[in-house]
Image (cartoon, rainbow, N blue to C red):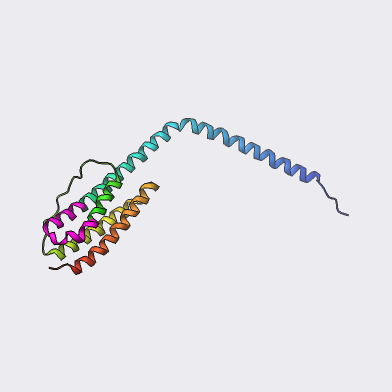
Amino acid sequence: MRRTGTTRRGALTATGAIAMGAVLAGCGSDDESAGRKGSARADARTAADRSSAETSLRVRARGVSTALLARYEHVVQAYPATAAGLSPLRDAVRAHITALGPGGALGFVRTPPATGDAAAAVRELAAAERRTAASHTEALLQAPPELARLLASVAAAASAHAYLLTELAKETKA
């Protein structure tokens, strides 16, 4: 018959494993607590750096969208017949600027003079929307999660606007 229960060899193996685990755990906990005491300032510095980076990303994204809004305003002023089709998209871009961060008055960027006809101006707006979507998508790589979700949403909206503007350009009279 075979013996059941604990053998001397099994007891020594279990005791050795427990002792080795205690030694390894004891060594690791001293290093971690010493690292935590010294890294409080480093953690604060890292948090400040992250906040500064996020603010910088927001400012850049807001600037890109503000330039796009300036283009919308320019096209509507140059071609009043396009105002009905562009107003909802322009209002959405204005809402994106507000969502991207606090700021006072929207500082408009100089836009190139309108060349050609209204359809060409709307096609240029579609291209500007595509560039805006690409810029916001590129910024996703460096953005923290909350800002990344916002940038993804704004980039998706810009892509949809580009499609709508392309279709509007086909319908716009020269």
Residue sitting at x 20%, y 51%:
67
Count every numbered label the image shows and give the total.
0
Quarter containing the N terminus: bottom right
Q: Is the magenta stretch mostly helix, strand or loop?
A: helix
Q: Name the residue nearer the viewer: 5 or 168.
A: 168
Is residue 82 shown in magenta?
yes
Quarter containing the C terminus: bottom left
Where does residue 21 sit, x and y in percent of width and height? 65, 40
- Relative side of 112 to 130, left or right: left
Residue sitting at x 24%, y 53%:
91
Where does residue 47 sit, x and y in percent of width and height? 39, 37
Where does residue 62 sit, x and y in percent of width and height? 26, 47
Magenta stretch, residue numbers: 69-89
Q: Name the residue nearer the viewer: 54 or 123.
A: 123
Q: Quadrant of residue 54?
A: top left
Residue 141 in view:
no
Is residue 1 shown in magenta?
no
Q: Name the residue nearer the viewer: 109 or 106.
A: 106
Image: 60 above or below 165 = above
Image: 78 above or below 23 = below
Residue 55 in view:
yes
- Relative side of 137 to 18, left or right: left
Residue sitting at x 14%, y 63%:
118
Where does residue 42 sit, x and y in percent of width and height? 42, 34
Residue sitting at x 49%, y 30%:
37
